[in-house]
C-alpha cells in the first residue's frame, strides 16, 4: 500500500504538470499575440512582394510601357497569381506618374472578388511607393489601430516600365477585443490557481517530510544500548504533536516498567549470583579444611607439603573466581580507539599458541578483512573477551583438533568468531551458557563466558553461541555505529 507521502507527492506532480501545461498555453497565446502576429504578417507581405516582382519581370519582359488595357489585364492576372498563395494579402503594381497599374486581393472573403483599391489606406500606399522609388530599397509601414495593425510593404521593380513599384498589404489582428482579453484573464487566473495550489501543497509536503524525517532521526538516533524510548520533540503540527505526545507518554510508561523489571532482574541476578558463588567457594574451602586437618593429624612432612600445595591450588582457583566475578560486576566503560584489526588478532592468538601446542591443538587466525576507517573498540577489554573464548576452546578441543579465530564485516557490524572442533555445548545449557556459574566442565568457574557477554554489551554489541554441525562457535558482534559516537 502506498504511503500518504507518496500520494501527496503524486498529487503535487499532477498539479505541477497542469500548471506547466497552462503556462505553455499562455506562452503559446503570447506568441500568437500582437508582436508575433505582426512579425509573421511582415514576413508574409515581404515574401508576397518579392513574388510579385518576380511575376512582373516575367510578364513585362520586352515592354517599354504599359499602354493598352490588355497589358494591364496581364498585370492584374500576374498580381492575382503572385498573391494567391498568401492568405489575407492584397497588393498591386504602382507607377509614380500614373498611380495603380494593377490591383488584386485573391483571398478576399467577401461576396465577390475585390477589385477596388482600399480608399482609407491609399495615402499610405502612395507614400510608401514614393519612398521605395527615392531609396531604391524595400520599405515597410505600420498603421496601428485598436484591434489590428495594417502592414504596408513596397519593393522596387527594376524593369522596362519606368517608376514602377510593387506593394503588398495585410491586416494583423492584435486580439485587443473584449473576448480575447477575457480569455487571457481566465487563463491567467487558471494558471495562477494551479501554480498556487502546487506551491501550497509542495510547501505542506516539504514541511511534513522534514518534521517526519526529524522524528525518524530522533527515533533512530537513540543510544543502541540505552533501551529507553527517546523523548520526541514537538513539531508544531497539531496532528503530529498528538502522535508525539502519545509516543512520549508511552515511552515514559515503558521506561518506568523497564526500570521496575530491571530492578527485579537485578535482585534475581544477585540471588542467583550469591547462590552460585556460595556453591563455588564452599567446595574449595571444605577441601582445604580437610587437607589441613589431615596434615595436622599426621606427622609426615611429605604429606604436609602435598597438603599445602593442594591448598595453594585451591586458593588460586578462588582468586581466579573472584577476579572473574569482579570483572563481570565492576565492568568499566569502554574507551574506544582505532584498531589495526589484523595486528590485534595476531597478538591475541600469539599469547595462546604455546598452550595450544602443548595440548596438540592447532590454533590459526584468518586474515582480517581491510576496513576504512579502521574499527574502534577498547582493545584491552576485547583482548580479555577473546582470551576467555580462546582458553575455553583450548580446554574443549581434543588432541589433534583445531581452533579458528576469524573476523568479518556485515552491514553495520564487525563479527569476531572463535570456533573449535571439540564436543560442543550440551543441549541442556545452550540457552544459559552465558549466565554466571553455568559451565559444562567440572573444573570451570562458569564466569568466563559471562564476562565475554558483559564486555560485548558494554560496547553496544552482543555475544552469542552460533549453531554448528560439530564443535562450538562463539561470536562477538560489535555495531559499527558505536565506533564513532
Image (spheres, rainbow, N blue to C red):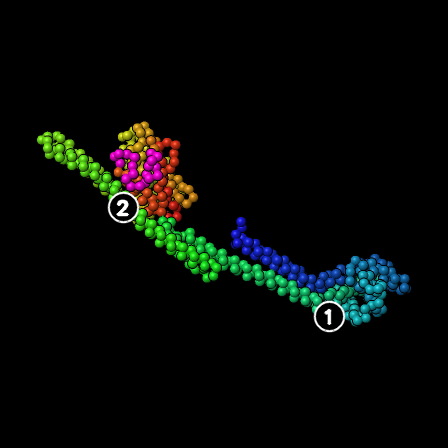
| Secondary structure beneath label 1 | loop
- Find disc 2 in the rendering and name its residue: 270
- Find disc 1 in the rendering and name its residue: 145
Residue 354: x and y in percent read 27, 33
- The image quadrant of residue 71 is bottom right
User: Is 48 a magenta residue?
Assistant: no
Please indicate whether residue 428 sits to the left or right of residue 57 in the image: left
Label 1 packing within 10 angstroms: few (<14), some (14-19), many (20+): few
Q: Tell me what residue is drawn at x 25 percent, y 34 percent.
A: 443
Return the residue found at the far left.
299
Instruction: Between residue 406 and residue 158, name the one nearer to us.
Output: 406
* Residue stretch in magenta: 426-444
Q: Is residue 60 above or below residue 434?
A: below
Residue 250: x and y in percent read 40, 55
User: Is 429 a magenta residue?
Assistant: yes
User: Majority secondary structure of the magenta segment?
Assistant: loop
Viewer can see residue 428: yes
Mark 1 vs 2, N-terminal side: 1
- The image quadrant of residue 451 is top left
Q: Tell me what residue is drawn at x 9 percent, y 31 percent.
A: 299
Amino acid at each position: 500500500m502506498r504511503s500518504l507521502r507518496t500520494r501527496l507527492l503524486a498529487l503535487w506532480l499532477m498539479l505541477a504538470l497542469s500548471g506547466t501545461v497552462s503556462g505553455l498555453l499562455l506562452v503559446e497565446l503570447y506568441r500568437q499575440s500582437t508582436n508575433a502576429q505582426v512579425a509573421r504578417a511582415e514576413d508574409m507581405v515581404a515574401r508576397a512582394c518579392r513574388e510579385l516582382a518576380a511575376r512582373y519581370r516575367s510578364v513585362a519582359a520586352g515592354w517599354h510601357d504599359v499602354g493598352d488595357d490588355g497589358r494591364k489585364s496581364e498585370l492584374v492576372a500576374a498580381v492575382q497569381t503572385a498573391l494567391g498563395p498568401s492568405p489575407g494579402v492584397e497588393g498591386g503594381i504602382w507607377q509614380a506618374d500614373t498611380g495603380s497599374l494593377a490591383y488584386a486581393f485573391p483571398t478576399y472573403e467577401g461576396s465577390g472578388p475585390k477589385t477596388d483599391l482600399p480608399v482609407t489606406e491609399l495615402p499610405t500606399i502612395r507614400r510608401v511607393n514614393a519612398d521605395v522609388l527615392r531609396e531604391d530599397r524595400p520599405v515597410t509601414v505600420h498603421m496601428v489601430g485598436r484591434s489590428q495593425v495594417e502592414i504596408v510593404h513596397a519593393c522596387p521593380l527594376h524593369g522596362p516600365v519606368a517608376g514602377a513599384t510593387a506593394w503588398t498589404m495585410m491586416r494583423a489582428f492584435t486580439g485587443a477585443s473584449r473576448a480575447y482579453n477575457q480569455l487571457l484573464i481566465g487563463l491567467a487566473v487558471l494558471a495562477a490557481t494551479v501554480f498556487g495550489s502546487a506551491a501550497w501543497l509542495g510547501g505542506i509536503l516539504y514541511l511534513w517530510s522534514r518534521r517526519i524525517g526529524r522524528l525518524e532521526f530522533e527515533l533512530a538516533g537513540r543510544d543502541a544500548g540505552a533501551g529507553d524510548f527517546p523523548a520526541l520533540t514537538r513539531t508544531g503540527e497539531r496532528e503530529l504533536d498528538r502522535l508525539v505526545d502519545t509516543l512520549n507518554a508511552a515511552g515514559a510508561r515503558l521506561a518506568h516498567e523497564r526500570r521496575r523489571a530491571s530492578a527485579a532482574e537485578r535482585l534475581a541476578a544477585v540471588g542467583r549470583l550469591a547462590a552460585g558463588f556460595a556453591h563455588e567457594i564452599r567446595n574449595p574451602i571444605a577441601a582445604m579444611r580437610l587437607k589441613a586437618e589431615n596434615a595436622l593429624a599426621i606427622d609426615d612432612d611429605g604429606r604436609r607439603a602435598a597438603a599445602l600445595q593442594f591448598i595453594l591450588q585451591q586458593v588460586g582457583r578462588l582468586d581466579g573466581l573472584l577476579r572473574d566475578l569482579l570483572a563481570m560486576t565492576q565492568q568499566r566503560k569502554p574507551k574506544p580507539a582505532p584498531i589495526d584489526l589484523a595486528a590485534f588478532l595476531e597478538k591475541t592468538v600469539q599469547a595462546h599458541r604455546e598452550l595450544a601446542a602443548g595440548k596438540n591443538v592447532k590454533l590459526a587466525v584468518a586474515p582480517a578483512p581491510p576496513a576504512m576507517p579502521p574499527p574502534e573498540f577498547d582493545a584491552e577489554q576485547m583482548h580479555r573477551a577473546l582470551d576467555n573464548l580462546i582458553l575455553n576452546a583450548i580446554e574443549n578441543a581434543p588432541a589433534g583438533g583445531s581452533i579458528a579465530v576469524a573476523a568479518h564485516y556485515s552491514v553495520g557490524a564487525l563479527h569476531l568468531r572463535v570456533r573449535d572442533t571439540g564436543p560442543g555445548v550440551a543441549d541442556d545449557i545452550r540457552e544459559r551458557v552465558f549466565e554466571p556459574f553455568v559451565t559444562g566442565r567440572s573444573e570451570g568457574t562458569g564466569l568466563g563466558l559471562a564476562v565475554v557477554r558483559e564486555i560485548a554489551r558494554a560496547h553496544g554489541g552482543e555475544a552469542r553461541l552460533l549453531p554448528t554441525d560439530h564443535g562450538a562457535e562463539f561470536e562477538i558482534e560489535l555495531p559499527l555505529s558505536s565506533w564513532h559516537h
